[in-house]
Image (cartoon, grey):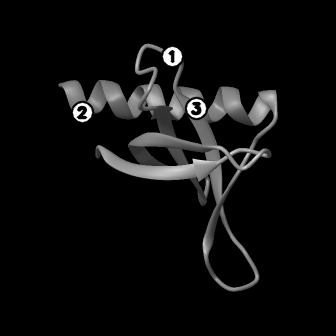
Amino acid sequence: MGERHLFYDELGNGIEFIIKAKFSLDDTDYVAMLPTDDIESATYILRVEMDDEGDEILVGIDDDELEEAQEAYEELIKEYLQ
C-alpha cells in the first residue's frame, strides 16, 4: 500500500508510519504498519474500529489476537509474492 499516516503518542509527539497492508480476519479489520524512521523495525499490527463519530481508530490487541492476525498477514504476504 505504502500510504503514510501521522500518529501521535501519549506525549503528543508525531510519528509517521507507512501502512503496509489492510486486511480482514473473521470480520475484523486490521492494519499492518511500520514507522518511517525505522523501516528495519518489526511490523505493528493493530485492529481497526469505529469511534462514536464513525471515524476509524486503531486499537492495540492482546497476544493471542496478535498471533492470529500475524499469521493472516504472513499468508497475505505469501499470496502477494506468488
* Location of residue 52 (image quadrant): bottom right
Please give left or right for residue 45 compared with residue 63 in the image. left
- Residues packed near mark 1 inside 10 Å, few (<14), some (14 to 19) or many (20 plus): few
The numbered mark at residue 80 is 2
| Residue appearing at x 65%, y 32% in the figure | 68
How far across and how far down the image is residue 71, in percent?
A: 55, 26
- Residues packed near mark 3 inside 10 Å, few (<14), some (14 to 19) or many (20 plus): some
Mark with earlier residue (3, 2): 3
**Which quarter of the rendered picture does the C terminus lie within?**
top left
Question: Mark 1 near mark 3, Cβ–Cβ under 8 Å?
Answer: no
3D distance between C-alphas at marks 2 and 1: 21 Å
Q: Which residue is mark 3?
A: 44
**Residue 43 appears anywhere in the view:** yes
How far across and how far down the image is residue 53, in percent?
A: 69, 86
Q: Nearer the viewer, mark 2 or mark 1?
A: 1
> Considering depth in this image, is 10 or 42 the residue closer to the camera?
10
| Residue appearing at x 66%, y 44% in the figure | 13
3D distance between C-alphas at marks 1 and 3: 9 Å
Q: Nearer the viewer, mark 1 or mark 3?
A: 1
Q: Which residue is mark 1?
A: 41
> Considering depth in this image, is 27 or 6 the residue closer to the camera?
6
3D distance between C-alphas at marks 3 and 2: 19 Å
